[in-house]
Amino acid sequence: MTNTSRSDATTKKTIEMVEVSPRDGLQNEQRAIATHDKLALIERAIASGARRIEVTSFVNPRAVPQMADAEAVCAGLPGRGDVTYIGLVMNMRGAERAIATGRIDQLGAVAVGTDTFAMKNQGQTSDGSVEACRNIIARAKDAGLTGQATIAASFGCPFEGEVEEDRVIAMATAIAEAGPVEIALADTIGVGNPAHVERLVARVREAIDPLPVRVHFHNTRGTGLANVWAAISAGASVVDASIGGLGGCPFAPGAAGNVATEDVTYMLERAGIETALDLDTLIETNRWLADVMGKDLPAMVSKAGGFPKPNISSTS
């Protein structure tokens, strides 16, 4: 494991990372990515230390063409008992598709903080999306899987603007009753700020205790890493990130790049917080993925490199 952190005598805190590049990282890209490249990305993520990976989404391929090969991706997943493969689903039809593959370990359901975005994203109201989440989590359990939920637009909506904190808390409380493994707060369009993040994460954490809070940030306005730090400070224990900083939502205008896995890893490890990820492998994967995508990727650490290694030469 690459030593990216300063050594100290204190007990290190650990943050669980969820790698979302194969799904959220690619879903909004116009360039069609071959199934074998998606599988190679997943294998490289595993080699970097990722043990929870959002591998695909089971959505209408007309709406999200990049995810049309969901079943093919699942068929090619390496058999790893130590890796949790997550499939994003928006409705029960998607849930049944994911379950039928026999390769998905966890269903990821989505609720949306506003009616307008919920209608564009899932064709139902915000309340309807909460009920759908609860049903998907129950179906996952029936199938012997686990379920988790993400509340999209927790920090702001591209159509309605401000989202009331009390609304997000009420949604999280209702979803928690279904027994997911965790609930995520997503800054879908990258409008969050650290003060808002710290306050909302703390309130949701208190409301759903003992369930963990996961966070999902986009770096659209340059606040992604600051928001990750604020969320962890407020008690979030799981962080979504995407290798290279790729990502975006097809139904949310301006929802550019996720926080980059290598950037988050560098920041946390240097601060003495363990991620179980290897930074050098992530940087190598960034360069490989840039070739696949045919463009430079947004992540900063892969451009600059990790913390300088000592280069001491002796003279006699």
Image (cartoon, helix red, strand yellow):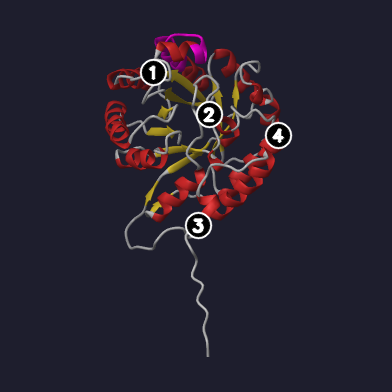
> Residue 179 at x, y = what percent?
40, 23
Determine which residue is flagged by label 4: 76
Q: Tell me how many marks there are.
A: 4
For marks 4 and 3, give the one nearer the viewer.
Answer: 3
Q: Amino acid at mark 4?
A: Gly
Q: Residue at x 52, y 58 (%)?
A: 2
Residue 128 lies in magenta, yes or no? yes
Determine which residue is flagged by label 2: 248
For marks 2 and 1, give the one nearer the viewer.
Answer: 2
Residue 9 visible in this rendered orientation of the protein = yes
Please give the range of residues in magenta. Answer: 120-134
Residue 89 lies in magenta, yes or no? no
Q: Amino acid at mark 2?
A: Gly
Dot 4 falls on a residue whose secondary structure is: loop
Q: Using the rendered view, name the quadrant where residue 163 is placed.
A: top left
Residue 278 visible in this rendered orientation of the protein = no
Front residue of 295/266: it is: 295
Determine which residue is flagged by label 1: 113
Earlier in the chain: of badge 2 and badge 4, it is 4
Q: Amino acid at mark 3?
A: Gly
Of helix, strand and loop, which mostly describes the magenta segment? helix
Earlier in the chain: of badge 3 and badge 2, it is 2
Earlier in the chain: of badge 1 and badge 4, it is 4
For marks 2 and 4, give the one nearer the viewer.
Answer: 2
> Residue 206 at x, y = what percent?
27, 30
Badge 2 density bin: few <14, some 14–19, many ≥20, Cα 10 Å: many
Earlier in the chain: of badge 2 and badge 1, it is 1
Q: Amino acid at mark 1?
A: Gly
Dots 2 and 1: beta carbons under 8 Å?
A: no
Q: Residue at x 60, y 18 (%)?
A: 59
